[in-house]
Amino acid sequence: MAGHRNILFIMCDQLRWDYLSCAGHKTLHTSNLDALAARGVRFSNAYCNSPICGPSRMSFYTGRYVSTHGATANFVPLRIGERNIGDHLKPLGVRPVLVGKTHMMPDRDGMARLGIDPKSEIGLHHREAGFEPFERDDGIYPDRMMKMMKGQPRYNDYLRAKGHEGGNPWHWAANAVDTPEGVRSGFFNDIADRPARVSEEDSETPYMTRRAMEFMAEDDGKAPWLLHLSYIKPHWPYIAPAPYHDMYGPDDVQDPVRAEAELIDTNPLMKHFIDRIAGQTFSREEAIRKVVPTYMGLIKQIDDQLGILFAFMEERGLLENTTIVFTSDHGDYLGDHWMGDKEYFHDASVKIPLIIADPDPAMDATRGTVSDALVQGIDLLPTFIDHFGGTPPEHLLDGVSLRPLLTGEAQDVNGAVFSELDYHQQVFAPAIGRGPRDCRIYMVATKEWKYIHAPGFDPVLFDLKNDVEELHDLGPSPDHADIRETMHRYLADWSLTYRQRETYDAAAAARFTAFEEKAGVLIGYWDEADMIDPQNAPDPDQQPDIEPKQGSGMP
């Protein structure tokens, strides 16, 4: 392969794992993503590490679990000392470039404490999660939020130049519709079947696709890049431009995965999520038949735009040396299990699509295959580091490289996957009497079982082999007490791992094993005769190296 080996890291927002035709959807046809899967590996058991935008994305960008990086909810800053994707890739000579959304909240208090100017090079590096922002656009700008912001997204300037006047054309043009009663906001789902007030060309997905192509056209080719093309859709507002607004109809909608039994003796915390306004809306058949066709249209638009992007890359020879990674930050219930939006742990919410197509001949053995290996969002950053010739630092990353799965050297890399949710921002949180530090939910899943633990509530257990649709909560089942105990221990062992020991790697640990004896600090010896025991005697050829080493975490 000629030229630098690049990565195009595509992420959609709120795209379900099963809303691709290559993943089995019966009426939504995603030909370009199907073709991508045919020349790579599609992972059918990929999970996000939190079923909500910000925390999930911070796990992708740090390679660490939510309880490790600490940005546990939307709008919770990523602390200043947390290593991000740029910290790992820039030393390898790679440009990590952003087009689209990150949901990154900078640690302004931390920067002020350390005297870091947010506008400085290091301040920008932290504010953008290590990305070089070709264009950042987090894509959710209702009027009240816009008033809180300093400045406006570039996309609003673009819309004004196209004739869409007003203070916030993102809201009132791209995500609003015309009705006989006047212009209405797309946040209201009863109008989801109406077309957006912008043309297809001027809607968000084509705009971001063009910006990605502009970056590729402007790139001087001097350094390899990772371009994070982060689409805002199909995240709500569920509004699509013509012709995508009515490309699908009620008859194209797959029936929701739910049962009346789920509403009987429901786990109390799960019931709070069902009772949210989104759950009430999507419990209605009318809502599902009206909104889901638009959701499908938004996905079809993304697939069509990816076809345009891939053709652009092919014309420039970029497909020959660019690995393409396609995924989502989390899913969307769309009425499954009587819920709307996301933020709980059924597959509709916590599983994500993942396709990796690497043109390297070393990957030929797995090309066009589907892997059922358990993988998670945090595994991508180690995979990127591996791709660019680095060694993923195990003491800094919770994830593992997926390269052995891509080459066919391994069938599994994780025995289980983990996801977390901090629900203190939920509307119902104050009513349940738990403080912000106590609103925690943890999920551990193997290929056989999914266990959900929330302090203060009974556990939830699903049998993933015999109850694939997760309709029967075995949390109260006396016949499954042993399974619950086993899964709880799995979760406990995971939670008690030394994941915060960032300054001390495995090499340092080896050097300091029996350090005191090697250094002549003889604790508990009776007399010199104890030194004769070879087990205790210092080895003169194995003296510890106590000089500082770059990156070793040594003092």
Image: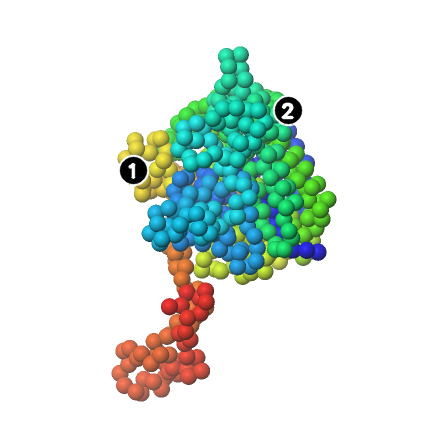
- Location of mark 2 (residue): 243
Give how far across and how far down residue 238 sits, in percent.
53, 27
- Location of mark 1 (residue): 434
Give how far across and how far down residue 402 sits, in percent.
57, 53
Secondary-structure class at tag 1: loop
Q: Quadrant of residue 498?
A: bottom left
Question: Quadrant of the image for the C terminus?
Answer: bottom left
* Residue at left offset 46%, top offset 67%: 550
Give how far across and how far down residue 225 sits, in percent.
59, 51
How dense is the environment of label 2, judged by Cα within 10 Å: few (below 14), some, or many (20 and up)?
Answer: some
Work out whether residue 54 or residue 161 is closer to the camera in this orientation and state it: 161
How dense is the environment of label 1, judged by Cα within 10 Å: few (below 14), some, or many (20 and up)?
Answer: some
Q: CA distance from mark 1 to mark 2?
A: 47 Å
Instruction: Confirm or deny contact between disc 1 and disc 2 (CB under 8 A).
Output: no
Residue 468 visible here = no
Question: Quadrant of the image for the N terminus?
Answer: bottom right
* Residue at left offset 34%, top offset 31%: 428
